[in-house]
Image (tube, helix red, strand yellow):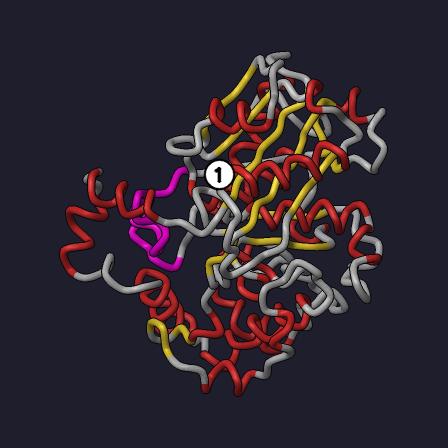
Amino acid sequence: MTTSIRGRVAIIGIGETAHVRNWPGRTHNGLLAEAAAIAIKDAGLRQQDIDGVLTFGGGVAPAGVAEYLGLKNVTFSCGVTMFGASNGVAAMVAAAALECGYCNYALFVAGGARDTSWLRETRGMTPSPNTEFHGLYGTAVAANNGYGLCYTRHMYEYGTTPAQMARMAVDQRFNTMNNPRSAFRPQGLITVDDVLNSRYINYPLHILECVMPIAGAACYIMTTAERAKAAPKKPVYMLGNGFYQGSSTSWMGHDVLNDITLMATERGAKNAYLVSGYGPNDIDVVECYD
Amino acid sequence: MCVESSHVWGLQRGDIGPFYENTDTTYKGTHPINTDGGQLSSGQLNPAGASGTQQTMEMVRQLRGEAASEMEGHQVPDANLGLAMY
């Protein structure tokens, strides 16, 4: 990488709604607008300051979202269809757009009412290696099937045990006890035995080790390091980022590298460290897709 | 997630089982991971490409020090550098 993004852009505002299993009466756009409004206020900005919009794309294209949010000065927008990595890749795209001067304040927003009809439509219409070759043998039928296979292989390769992995769910439940937005906070703490005695969703994954979809939305606003100095709250600077393209079935491991216990994040993380100048032992806190 | 979280703190891929067994990964612990509870415990923002975004939200809260004032607090002390993965 010849040009470094290190320290040149920052997140200056965030907005996140509550996480609610079912949220009757709330609309997709309404929840996006709620998160965006919180983030714009958090960044000390006004609607008219937002000139960059990034969304998931497809049925949630930037045009419709910008219109609903009443953003009338948008000079850059982009749909980033990267599923669970959308917000991360959007941050890379926003960084590039800010550096190029395409926009001054880039807003990413995603979420909505819990409606997965778009997913059924996409799966039914678009052939992929997953639908054409893996799905035929059952991997598309069950929830978390790919993750179950990845986990089983990890147990075989490395001797990883369900009791060890259950600690992850136990620690995260502890962490959520002071998260006011959390859907599971009211259910209280759990133990390793609770996890191991809960029913299987996909062996060896128990239900307490599987995420539950909820309604809600989240938004962040990025700007250049120069503009971030005027933000009312402490800017969070991007010191590095990294991306590595997995295969269309990389959610069940890494087909490209013929190793299902390897994820594309391993390559992505290496580049993030390289750009930032920091290493794995410098990290104070980790937030990773779960 | 066990595979993802093995890219920090010098862990190798096979280390992650014993790591979770012997390490406090809560916000009070030595190796804090998913300090808002992650998607697993707070619910996964599900619709269209939103999943993973809460990881960024929580990273910003931690690096600003704002998690200290949420309810009884879930702040990692002196959090200056974070790694978010999706």
Dividing the picture into quadrants, the one containing residue A284 is bottom right
Vertical order, B57 against A61 (above or below): below
Tell me the quarter of the image containing the N terminus of chain A.
top right
Q: Main secondary structure of the magenta part?
A: loop
Report the span colored magenta.
A245-261
Residue A280, x across and y down, in percent: 65, 51
Q: B58 and A49: which one is in front?
A: A49
Vertical order, A148 against A42 (above or below): below
Vertical order, A31 against B35 (above or below): above
Residue at the extreme front of the image, as rendered? A25
- Determine the residue positioned at 20% across, 44% down: A124
Name the residue carrying label 1: A86
Query: Does residue B9 appear to the left or right of A23 in the view shown?
Result: right
Q: Secondary structure at mark 1?
A: helix
Is residue A97 part of the magenta span, yes or no? no
- Determine the residue positioned at 81% across, 66% down: B72
Residue A128, x across and y down, in percent: 22, 41
Count of numbered labels shown in the rendering: 1
For the question of whether residue A290 can be seen, the reply is: no
Vertical order, A9 against A195 (above or below): above
Query: Does residue B41 appear to the left or right of A156 in the view shown?
Result: right
Residue A114, x across and y down, in percent: 45, 52
